[in-house]
Image (cartoon, rainbow, N blue to C red):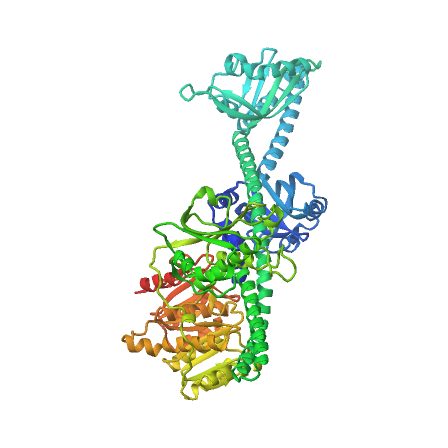
Amino acid sequence: MNPATNAPAGATPAAASDLSSVEQVKSSRPYRELLRLFEQAPGFVCFFRGPQHVYELQNQAHHRLAGFRDIIGKPVRAALPELEGQQFFELLDQVFASGQAFVGQALPLAVAPAGGGPATLRYIDFVYQPIVDEGGAVVGIFSQGNDVTERVLAEEQLRRKQEELERMVEERTRALADAHAALKLANELQGDKMHLQRLFEQAPGFICVLRGPDHVYELANAAYRRLVGGRDLIGKTLRAVLPEVEGQGFGDLLDSVYRSARPYIGRAAPVELHNDPAQGPALRYLDFIYQPVLDPTGQVIGIFVQGSDVTEQKLAQDALGRHQAELETLVTERTAELTATQDALQRSHKLEAIGKLTGGVAHDFNNILQVVGGNLELLQRRGGDPRVQNLLQVALHAVERGGKLCSHLLAFARRQPLQPVVVNPARVVADMDDLLRRALGETIHIEAVRAGGQWNTVVDPNQLENVILNLAINARDAMPNGGRLTIEIANAMLDDDYVAAEPDVRPGQYVMIAVSDTGCGMARDVLERACEPFFTTKPEGAGTGLGLSMAYGFVKQTGGHFRIYSEVGEGTTVRLYFPRTFEAEDAAMRLSDVAPQGGSETVLVVEDDPAVQGTVVEMLGSLGYRVLKADNATDAYGIVKSGLPIDLLFTDVVMPGPMRSPELARLARALLPDLAVLFTSGYTRNAIVHGGRLDAGVELLSKPYGRDQLARKVRHVLANRPRAAAEAAPAAPRGARILIVEDNPDLLDMACSLFDALGQDARGAVSFDEALARLEDGACDVLFTDIDLAGKSGIDLACRARALHPQLRVVFASGYGAPDRGALGFAYDVVAKPYRLDDLRAMLARQG
């Protein structure tokens, strides 16, 4: 397919993300072969979308037929207005409305060239085939056909010449039958004979005249002699000259025409000729006419044979038919694949919709919980009536449950900000032994089965503990009279045969954790809905219905595989598969194991919700910290630039105003290299979380949090701020000056963070004009730009940047290709989207 005429322009990153599963189908080998077949089809092919017949696809043959005009994305009436009144628009309307295909043959078509000028008349054979969706509704029309202008013109020319020859033969036959007229006009006929002979000899089709019932050759032109391999013809019978055609029906046809005096017309009739013994029989296809020749009394005296060798055309038509059949087969196969992909996409859209709803609810609800929980803790610390203290504790437990509810929703929607590390799952389960026994009680017997040589995996250990605990509690509720809970940790291999039925799973090595119970089990209909959020078979008030959905979302977000096996009366097994890693386990201490403590450093709190801000300021003040506050990132940056000493920037992720929190953190660290940064949010969206994981080097405290959690996290971040790292190791030299140009603010923040993590001096611009202004104000070493910048070209930007700074190195970031090598006159690099830290590191290594 020609990207210049068929690729959709201006595709947004969000749309690219939505269609990620569709993009995997497009990258497969069968799909590429289908595209190559589509583009190289000898006839024209195109696809109209919707009742307005908007051009969505076309191959090169159709592009040429349409005068090489830019028609993709345009309704056909606007793209080819000169077709008005030529029936084609009405036929399209009729096919779309009726759902019935239309076949047209040799219909005249007048198409004007793209640059203007008179229209040229063409003749086309074509098919309009309606395309329907899964409900049977027509969504578009698939058109294919051939430009048969040359054939029509040749046939018309041949018809005219045939009519002329027939008239002349008839006239000359009557003249020959009249002896007196023949003698009288002898001289005239001699001249006419020479003229007729020239016409006869030079005719483009083959011609011969057969005399008598034995079909003796009387005349044969050059085309006929070439057809039969230059054999000696005149005066010999057809059966003697061409013995090989005797069993192919041609002799019988000649006999029938001679007896009946009725002409015979043959279309693409196959004939085997033995012209070259060295090469063997040659199959040809002929269009021909057997026309009886009559004397003045009406008796047949011979047969006039005229025709054309249409072998090449027939072979091309047969090839087109095969290609069409193959295309239809491929379309059928791809339609099935597309149906499966659309089902997956619908599930993805459903998950995305729930995720967006969850994100908005989580952000606002967690802010409310933060205010409520923080003030309850502050009240609790003031002491007083024990009964009031008990009430406060009950309220704090409710806040904690509300926070867990939001966390479970985010986990199902795969929007939980994960902080994965290398862990050994057997150790995680072993550390949970006391917790599980307290949670399950004495009636449940717990058994852990661990295989030797256990592999490691990369997960968020806190979330993994939550998942195992939730599965254990679900198992406990399924065994009200007691039973056995088995937790198995083993190495596993998911091979190609297994993942063939699991399209979102990759084959390879995994760490498997299986949680099995001997409880009541689940029926098939319950099992099919088990992972839906809020679906539960427990009595009202006995469960949220989020345990399995949270576990499913966490495993998928981690890149793993989730499977449930259950049978009524036999129990249930939930298996979690996490990709294996070859790295050694991290030995990091959990913050929950550290005693909470305060400090005397200065903390700048940036929070737009006044109630949340007041609560956080009060909590930090109670821990001994000096506190500054700001309502938005712009005001906070003003405080940073004022010169006041600040040790920690504590900012909400979602902030109003033109400046985003990641940008505030980056600018603040540029002014205060020793500054520690801690983000907080009830829902992080994409600002500091990409691919389901926190960006490298980012610290996050999720809302709602308590005073002890705040104290531990603040001390942890302060203890690991850049100054502490600088005291332990000499400062590394700053890397290249990189200008990153990306019109998606979230992607711009991520790219800047990745380059910062690689030690580069990264600056961002969100538009073509802003980037150009920065380039005019000062030099940089590398221009890292997206190709599509909100309707403007990153390629044009690169050319203008090189004109300003000839030594500038250029890197294009693109999800759908790059300019042809050598087309711009300077060297450049390309990084394919989506890119990772390793991709950028490799690019920098290539840049030297």
| Quarter of the picture holding the C terminus | bottom left
Q: Is residue 706 above or below residue 16?
A: below
Query: Farthest residue toward the left?
Result: 730
Q: Is residue 307 above or below residue 542?
A: above
Report whether 730 appears left or right of 551: left
User: Is residue 114 visible in the rendered structure shown here?
Assistant: no
Report whether 283 appears left or right of 725: right
The residue lying toward the viewer, choosing from 567 and 14, is: 567
What residue appears at the point 58 percent right and 16 percent down from the top-left corner? 249
Residue 687 percent location from the top left of the image: 49, 70
Q: Is residue 429 above or below residue 382?
A: above
The residue lying toward the viewer, choosing from 515 and 655, is: 515
Report whether 126 appears left or right of 704: right
The residue lying toward the viewer, choosing from 206 and 628, is: 628
What residue appears at the point 54 percent right and 71 percent down from the top-left corner? 682
Q: For residue 734, which quarter of the picture?
A: bottom left
Report whether 262 appears left or right of 509: right
Number of marks present in the image shown: 0
Residue 87 percent location from the top left of the image: 70, 46
User: Is residue 755 visible in the rendered structure shown here?
Assistant: yes
Residue 355 percent location from the top left of the image: 57, 63
The residue lying toward the viewer, choosing from 527 and 484, is: 484
Q: For residue 214, which quarter of the picture?
A: top right
Residue 304 percent location from the top left of the image: 61, 20
